[in-house]
Amino acid sequence: MDIRVQQAAFALGQELERFAAGRPDTGAVVSFTGQVRDEGGTLASMEIEHYPGMTEKAISAIAAEAVARWSLTDCLVIHRYGRLAPGERIMMVATAAPHRGDAFAAAEFLMDYLKSRAPFWKKETGADGVSWVASKEEDEAALTRWDRTP
Amino acid sequence: MIDVLYFAWVRERIGLPRERVETSAATVAALIEELSAREERYAAAFADLSAIRVAVDQELTDMDAPLQGVREVAFFPPMTGG
């Protein structure tokens, strides 16, 4: 398990290469990347705040659960904080498993939980001023599908 | 003494990121009541508790969580990671 919370940008291709390499036990690697979305061309920047200390713990707990539930051979989470421009990468997850079904499911599980159980908050600066991104009901609802064991 | 931390708009409304609070509150809910009675900015931040999440010693919990032996309490809006 590799968990990183950082301000700096990361090299997506390089991270994925390194994560996938040297795993004869792994038949499937799935990755997801989140980027700053500018809906309607009005976003100037996004500021991501987090809770140092808790963030790493929360992500580690979520990742450990994913590894246990889907028998992953490994997983990687990188999440940035600080000020980001539209189109910049915010985060990535990658999962490795013997078979793709587990790798896909675990990646979705990680994303659902990172969305609303890891202490990050997004603030957007745009043409209409500054506003905190509100959480969505569907993000909370997305967690319930993981309630029962797979 | 408990370290109380605020994040995102809760931090902005209260006007500081963290403070040390001398309290005998038994639960998170009681601590919120104490803080809200202090000053209007606290009352404003805690006006709608459905919009507040809480972590005690860096673990998500709820308003009934006990505070005995606790070092750190954090208040923040629902998280928006990913």
Image (tube, grey):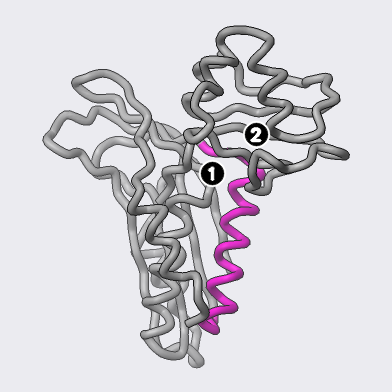
The residue sitting at 59% across, 78% down in the picture is A68
Instruction: Give the image location of residue A11, x and y in percent.
Output: 38, 56
Front-lying residue, A94 or A14: A94
Front-lying residue, A1 or A122: A122
Q: Is residue A11 left or right of residue B1?
A: left
Labelled disc at residue A119: 1
In which image quadrant can residue A60 be found?
Answer: bottom right
Instruction: Give the image location of residue B24, x and y in percent.
Output: 85, 25
Hey, what amino acid is under mark 2?
A: Ala
> Please, what is the dominant secondary structure of the magenta stretch?
helix
Hey, what amino acid is under mark 1?
A: Pro
Q: Is residue B11 visible?
A: no
What span is in magenta?
A50-73
- Per the image, label 1 sits on a secondary structure element best described as loop
- Per the image, label 2 sits on a secondary structure element best described as strand
The residue sitting at 56% across, 59% down in the picture is A3
Labelled disc at residue A38: none
Q: Is residue A75 magenta?
A: no
Q: Is residue B24 left or right of residue A23?
A: right
The residue sitting at 49% across, 35% down in the picture is B50
Return the residue found at the far top: B39
Crowding near the residue tagged with mark 1, few <14, some 14–19, many ≥20 C-alpha atoms within 10 Å: many
Instruction: Give the image location of residue B1, x and y in percent.
Output: 85, 25
Q: Is residue A72 magenta?
A: yes
Separation (CA) of disc 2 from disc 1? 10 Å
Instruction: Give the image location of residue A48, x and y in percent.
Output: 43, 36
Residue that mark 2 sits on: B74
Crowding near the residue tagged with mark 2, few <14, some 14–19, many ≥20 C-alpha atoms within 10 Å: many
Q: Is residue B61 left or right of residue B78?
A: right
Instruction: Report if the CB atoms under discs 2 and 1 are less than 8 Å apart.
Output: yes
Front-lying residue, B71 or B54: B54
In the image, is residue A150 above or below residue A33? below
